[in-house]
Amino acid sequence: MEFNAQKVDEANAVVTATVSKDLIEKNLDKVAKQAAKTLDIQGFRKGKVPVAIVKQRYADKLEQDAESDVLRDILAKSLEELNIKNDDLVGEPAVTKFDKKDNGDIDVEIKVACKPEVDLGDYKALIPEVEDKQIDEKEIAERLEEMSKSSAPLEKIKRKRMVRDGDFAVIDFEGFVDGVAFEGGKAEKYPLEIGSGSFIPGFEEQIIGMKYEEEKEVTVTFPEEYQSKDLAGKEAVFKVTLHEIQEKVAAEIDDEFAKKMLPNEEDATVDTLKEKIKEQLKNAEMAKYYREELKPLYLDKLVEELNFALPNSVIEQEINYALNNKVRSMSEEEIKALQEDASKVESMREELKEDAQKSVKATFIVDALAKAEGIDVSDQEVTQVIYYESMQMGQNPQDVLKQYQEAGYLPAIKMSMIEDKVITKLLDEKLGK
């Protein structure tokens, strides 16, 4: 079997071959004999099915298997000749040509993508200057005030008045749809924060102006996307009774307050708490500074300075991804125009190509940086981050993890975490941390 294997560049190779009809038929016999040993066909003992019967019954499937075996053999020998290891492959090799001739021969072309060799050079010399962000006393005082308010207990207001926005209205309520009470629509002495948006849209606004022990009917409509399908989109009437109005009385900011906020800190004082707040604020400010300013600046510089071949198949995937996102934001008329004129699609692909190349290039650069700096992220770390963020959003972590696994998002999340980790390390070193 003759084939021609050539490297286009460091990241791409192409294999061409003409597979003879005789070779396919020879391979077909081999595949049929193997199948005959395992097939269970009525009228024959298992393992004793004649090869001719197997060929007759499963002709199409056996022919596909025979052709696939030949392609695998061509690919294996080509990779060996080109000295490309399986670990160096990016994605699956693509069969870009498979033309059957009249004489039964098949012209084949296979394109192979490989991981490029990335020479980072003096990558640390390209790190931008890093400013050490400072936190002023005003920011610390504001955060202290927020903590004082958020941790404050609810207390009944000293004089009776009507409900205002921002109050905690202690209410009894019961909801009805078409005059029938529904499950989960009743509570007593419930402290509802007016303006929090925690109840059905329109409910809290109708509580404003109510007086102590006043009874009122509140009419609202459940959102169409409401979690309970029985209630989604339906109008409901709530019978509401206001018992009292409460407010949060900010705690005094003293050493006792500091001890409460820092339970694991021995002999905590207000000064200790201020130092902790300063540290938290600075870490948050630096993380934002790294993420929004320095990381894009550094990656853009690396992409501009470093030159290496990129696997074409990965660039095509990136273009397809960007194109799909763009199409999703188009109107029906714009999509119809694309369907009627294929040249417009190609024009869009060409417009997206440069950004796709930069994105792919940045991905391989980050991978090289991580190897150079000995940075890695375990699957367990990825799972922990997904669990934490899910719980913060009030979602079920296991459901979110399963959803991401099925959608194939985990490798991208892992790569993003590696990117943050390695660039943060380099920027911290530049700052002298």
Image (tube, helix red, strand yellow):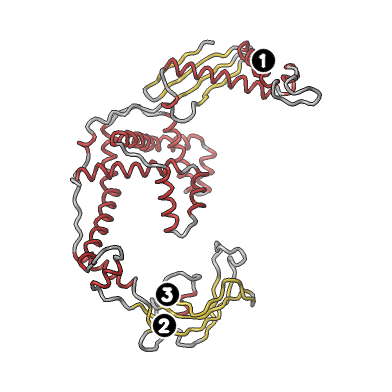
Left or right: 240, with 27 as reference point: left
269 shown above or below 90: below
Q: Amino acid at mark 3?
A: Glu
Residue 245 numbered tag: 2
Of all residues, the one furthest to the right in this rendering is: 43
Secondary structure, mark 2, is strand
Residue 32 coordinates in the image, percent (x, y):
68, 18
Closer to the N terminus: mark 1 or mark 3? 1
Secondary structure, mark 1, is helix
Q: Which residue is mark 1?
A: 29
Residue 138 coordinates in the image, percent (x, y):
20, 66
Q: CA distance from mark 3 to mark 2?
A: 10 Å
Q: Callout 2: few (<14), some (14-19), or many (20+) C-alpha neighbours within 10 Å? A: many
Q: Which residue is mark 3?
A: 193
Left or right: 400, with 150 as reference point: right
Q: CA distance from mark 2 to mark 1?
A: 87 Å
Closer to the N terminus: mark 3 or mark 2? 3
Q: Callout 3: few (<14), some (14-19), or many (20+) C-alpha neighbours within 10 Å? A: some
Q: Amino acid at mark 1?
A: Asp
Q: Residue 5's quadrant in the figure?
A: top left
Q: Amino acid at mark 2?
A: Ile
Closer to the N terminus: mark 2 or mark 1? 1
Identify the residue at horizontal 58%, vertical 66% (top origin).
Answer: 233
Total marks in image: 3
376 shown above or below 169: above
